Image: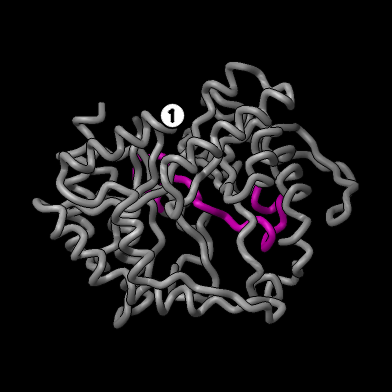
Amino acid sequence: MRVGSFVLAARFPGQGQGEALHRAVRSAEVAEESGLDSVWLAEHHFVPYGTCPSAVTLAALLLGRTRRLRVGTAVSVLPTVHPVALGEQAALLHLTSGGRFSLGVGRGGPWVDLEVFGSGLEAYESGFPESLDLLVRWLREPSVGADGERFRFREVPVVPRPSEALTDVAGPEVVVACTSPASVRLAAERGLPMLLGMHVGDEEKAEMIALWRRHAHAAGRPAAEIRGAGHVSAGVCQIADRRTDAVETLVKAMPGWLRQGLDAHVTVDGRARGMRDPVAYTELLCGLHPVGTPRLCVDRLAATSERTGISRFALLVEGSGDLAATEENVRRLGSEVLPHLR
């Protein structure tokens, strides 16, 4: 089982943006020190929900500061960036890190980001498959041209070529954030593993993986690829000597962050949007994920793995909003939970 942290660089009420980013970087450094497998970095624009606007940029910093840790994006929002530009960055990080970079991509939302970056609502509503295919081709082929609806250009060489890395894979791993049957099918037909969100439980994740396998079989993907697909489950982790203490830590801190962070999202076309009740959502997360004593956390992760077949986890460890508490949480995850999962 491979357990990593999920870093949003969340800005809690009363905190500055620099404070949130410092906690994000420091928690990743402590993750390597504590024996975690990986760090997954979120990307958001114009909202305090997450203060990292470029997951690949922060990934570059962390790859330079670590020696063993796998660093991934969770996710780079594909509709707001040119797939070739993102592919070049991913190839560069893959080569210079010795294959320690994973590229997670997603569709994002119908936010004002689409207006600011000039990609438009169509990039979100219908353009994701074309962008994903172009990105994957860039990471797998020696030269690439395009003649699609959104991207058209003459064939050009791929520089640097990620397949020239001194690793046992052709290029950086690509993971797709999946929240619907359509996105599951999209990932499965291309043989790409999924990143499954923290808002869904084991039963729904197991159903999504079963659907992925059916679509992958139907698309003729190799059996070994289907068996070995490294899907990633996002979740929350808070460790304390008593479960009530762990839950109290999150219920005190997370609703304020969620309320100000999620409410700041602005739609590009003025469409109405709803927001989860922050307290109820926090309580839901506490019930779904490893929040409690070290023994409870071990059992919860093992149970999820057994029910779903997932062996890779990206766990939000900064739910307290406090740097010292976050560092302690990561260290306890490494010293009191991971040894029992290996």
Q: Is residue 15 above or below residue 145?
A: below
Q: Is residue 278 above or below residue 126?
A: below
Question: Is 73 in the magenta?
Answer: yes
Q: Is residue 319 above or below residue 179?
A: below
Q: Position of residue 81 (x, y in %)?
A: 68, 60
Q: Which residue is mark 1?
A: 309
State the residue at coordinates (68%, 81%). 270
Q: Is residue 298 above or below residue 262?
A: above
Q: Residue 37's quadrant in the figure?
A: top left
Extreme-top residue of the structure = 223
Q: Is residue 15 left or right of residue 202?
A: left
Question: Is 193 in the magenta?
Answer: no
Q: Residue 162's quadrant in the figure?
A: top right
User: Which residue type carries mark 1?
Assistant: Gly
- Residues 307 and 5: in front is 307
State the residue at coordinates (23%, 54%). 238
Image quadrant where one finds the N terminus: top left
Image quadrant where one finds the C terminus: top left
Q: Residues within 10 Å of mark 1 (few under 14, many from 20)?
A: some
Q: Which residues are magenta?
A: 62-87
Q: Position of residue 156 (x, y in %)?
A: 82, 42
Q: Is residue 241 left or right of residue 17?
A: left
Q: Position of residue 13 (x, y in %)?
A: 32, 80
State the residue at coordinates (50%, 50%). 73
Q: Position of residue 160 (x, y in %)?
A: 66, 39
State the residue at coordinates (22%, 67%). 322
Picture mark count: 1
